[in-house]
Amino acid sequence: MRNTVAHRIGVASSAIGIAAASMMFSSSTASAATYSCPVDYVCVYDNDAFAGHVYAFPAANGYYEPNLNMDPPKWLSGVYLNDHISSIINNTRHTASFHKDANYKGGRTVIPPKSWNSKLSTTGFDNSISSFSVDISGT
Ligand SMILES: [Ca+2]
């Protein structure tokens, strides 16, 4: 448990740095913003087209986030990510699975490796994601 907490604190610190860096691209095009998600990270955005608040998860070795409504990740505005994510970049070599309910339940939308969804409303997942995983156990 201690390791988990320490890990999450480290994640939060690095995410703040990434969020600050991405602000430099706030007036750029969506395609330019794509490159603001570092290699081996999964980046989630508050708005369509990779705009608004961003949070970056280091997922080179997998990542498991069972409840975005309770766990530390928040936008810089202080709001939990739960039910706010509107676009996603998966810049890892693994498949990322996003679920509408906590604990990887409910509807699922999959973002393949090195790809993205710039408008989750097109697949019915806008502002509705509550958990996600980057599962490398089967690869
Ligand atoms: Ca949103």
Image: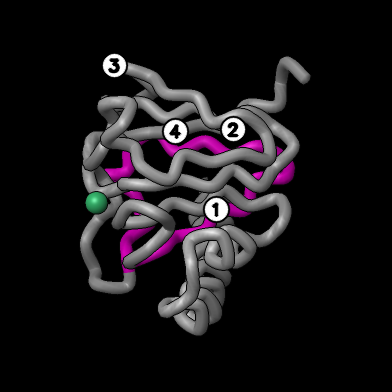
Q: Residues within 10 Å of mark 2 (few under 14, many from 20)?
A: many
Q: How many angstroms separate mark 1 from mark 2 (CA)? A: 10 Å
Disc 3 target residue:
106
- Is disc 2 in contact with disc 3, using a CB cutoff of under 8 Å? no
Overall secondary structure of the magenta section: loop
Q: How many angstroms separate mark 4 from mark 3 (CA)? A: 11 Å
The residue located at (26%, 26%) in the rendering is 124
Q: Earlier in the sequence, mark 1 or mark 3?
A: 1
Q: How many angstroms separate mark 2 from mark 3 (CA)? A: 17 Å
Q: Is residue 136 above or below residue 69?
A: above
Left or right: 64 as drawn, with respect to 106: right
Which dot marks residue 67? none
Q: How many angstroms separate mark 2 from mark 4 (CA)? A: 7 Å
Q: Which SS class for mark 2?
A: strand
- Is disc 2 in contact with disc 4, using a CB cutoff of under 8 Å? yes
Left or right: 71 as drawn, with respect to 4: left
The magenta stretch is 53-75
Q: Is residue 139 magenta?
A: no
Left or right: 132 as drawn, with respect to 84: right
The C terminus appears in which quarter of the rendering? top right
Q: Is residue 86 visible?
A: yes
Q: How is the image coloured?
A: one colour
Q: Residues within 10 Å of mark 1 (few under 14, many from 20)?
A: many
Disc 2 residue type (three-letter):
Val
Q: Is residue 69 magenta?
A: yes
**Which x, y percent locates residue 32?**
58, 66
Q: Which SS class for mark 4?
A: strand
Disc 2 target residue:
134
Disc 3 residue type (three-letter):
Gly
